[in-house]
Image (cartoon, grey):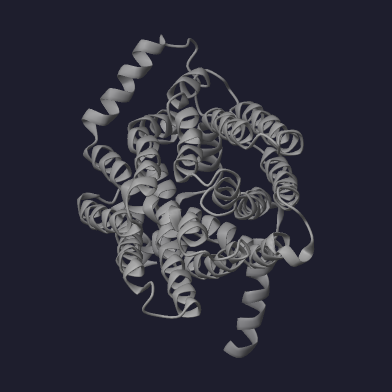
Amino acid sequence: MSELVAPRTTAMRLRRAFSAEYRDFWLIVANGVLVRLYFEVFSPKRVVAAFLTELTHREWMVGLALAAPTVFSCLPMLFFSHRMETEPRRMPFYARGARIKWVSQFALLFAVVMLPRYPMVLALFFVAMCGLFGLGDAMGGPAFGDVVARTIVPHRRGRMFGLRVALGGVLAFFVGGLISRCLDPRLGLPFPNNYLLLFGTAFAFLVAAQFCFMRVDEPPLESVPEQTQPLADYLRSALVVLRSDVNVRRFCIYRNLSPLGWVPAAFIIPYALGRLHFPPSVVGTIVSTSVVASSVSNLFWGSLGDKRGNSLVLRYSSLFLLLAAASLAVTPLLVGQVTQGTLLTWLVASNAIGEVGLVGMMNGQLNYLYDLAPDDQVPLYVGTVATAAAPMLIFAPLLIGWAAGRFDYIVIFTFGLVFSLAVWISTFGLGEPRPQQLRQRRKT
C-alpha cells in the first residue's frame, strides 16, 4: 500500500512546488540563474581580470576594478536604506538601481568599441563604469534583501539560494566553453572584439535577470513610518545596531577579514597569464571547473543552512577557503618542478576548492544577515553591515593589486593563507540567530 502512496505524494509535492503559491520563489530563482550567467561571463576575478591584464599588463588595474564597485555600493548603501524607510514599496528602488546598471554596462560596451587604441583611457573608463554599476547595487541591494526577506520564509531561503546557484551552474558550465572559444586565437576574433562579444552576452543576461525579479509580487509592509527620520538619526540607529547586537559586531569583523583571505585568489588569472604564460583561453577552463565545483557544493550549503543554521555554513565554507589558500601558497614552488599541464591542473584544482568555499560564504553571508535582521529592519541591517564591511572590501584589492606588481606571488598567496586562517577562526564567534526555529525543524 505504501508503494502506491509514495508516488502520489511525490506528484503532489511537485504540483505544489510549481503552483501559483511558489511563483515568486521561482522568479527569484530565475533571477539568480541569470545573474549567475552574467557574473560568469563578466566575472571581475576572471574575464574582466583577463581583459585588463591583456589591455594594460598591470596587476594594480585588476585590483582597482575589484575595488571600484565596492566604493560605490557599500558606502552609499545606508543613505539609500534611509531613503526607502518611509516608502510603502521597495521594488521601485530595485528598478532604479537596475537602470543604473544597464547604463553602466552599455557605456562600457560603447567604450570597448570606441577606445581600443587608448588602452589606459579605456581601462580607467572601464573601472569607472564598474563603479557606476556598484552605485546601482547600493540602490537596489537593500531593496532586493527586503523583498526577499518578506517573500521567502527563513527555512526556504537556503534552498532558494542553493537552487539559484545550482541551476545557474548547469547552464554556466557551457558558458565556460563559450569563453574558451571566444578567447581562442584560432576563432579569428581579434582583441578586444572577443571580449566585446562576451560583455554583450553578459549585458543580455543582466537585463533578463532583473526583469525576472521586477515581476515578483512584493508583499505589503506591516507598518510604514509616517515621517522620515533625519539621516543623522538613522545613522545613529545603525550604530545602535552595532552596539546592541554582538552577532552583528562579530559578523562585521568576519566580513572585514574575509576579503584579505579571498582577494589573493582573485589574482589567479593575472598570475596564470602574466607569470605562468598560459594562453587567454585558459580562462574558460577555470570558469567551467569553478562552475561545477560551486554548483554541486551550493546544494549542500543551502541544505545545511536551512537545517543546521548559517553560522555553520560560514564556518565550514571558510575552512574550504583556507584549504584553497594553502594549495595556492604552494603553487609558486611548483614552477619549474612540474610540467605546464600538471601546473595548470594544480591551479584549476586550487581554484575549484576556493570556489566551493566562496559560494558557501556568499550563501551563508546573505542568509545569516537576513536571519539577524528583524523583518521590519532589513534595509537598515543590510546597509549597516555593508558600510561596516566596506573598508577591507575596498582596500584589500588595492593592496593586493599593488603588491602583485612589486613582489613575487608566493608573498601574495602566503598573505592569503595567513588571513584565511584568521577568517576561519573568526567564524567560531558567530552565534546562531534562529536556534529555536532550528530545534523545531529537527523535531518535525
Give the answer, above or below, for where 270 lies relative to 98.
Answer: below
Quarter of the image where one finds residue 148: top right
Q: Is residue 1 visible?
A: no
Q: As displayed, is residue 11 above or below residue 437?
A: below
Query: Which residue sits at x=64%, y=67%?
Result: 173
Q: Position of residue 116 (x, y in %)?
A: 71, 39
Q: Specify whether residue 414 is in view.
A: yes
Residue 179 rendering spot, x and y as whole percentages: 67, 61
**Is residue 209 rendered to the left or right of residue 358?**
right
Q: Residue at x 35, y 36 (%)?
A: 395
Q: Relative to residue 176, is residue 369 depicted above or below? A: above
Q: Pick the quarter of the image with the C terminus.
A: bottom left
The front one of 426 and 268 is 268
Work out whether residue 100 or residue 28 is closer to the camera in this orientation and state it: 100
State the image quarter where residue 183 is shown.
Answer: bottom right
Q: Position of residue 347 (x, y in %)?
A: 44, 69
- Residue 99 falls left or right of residue 264: right
Using the image as rendered, state which of residue 33 and residue 178 is in the foreground.
178
Q: Position of residue 329 (x, y in %)?
A: 31, 64
Q: Quadrant of the N terminus?
A: bottom right
* Viewer-closest of 106 and 366: 106
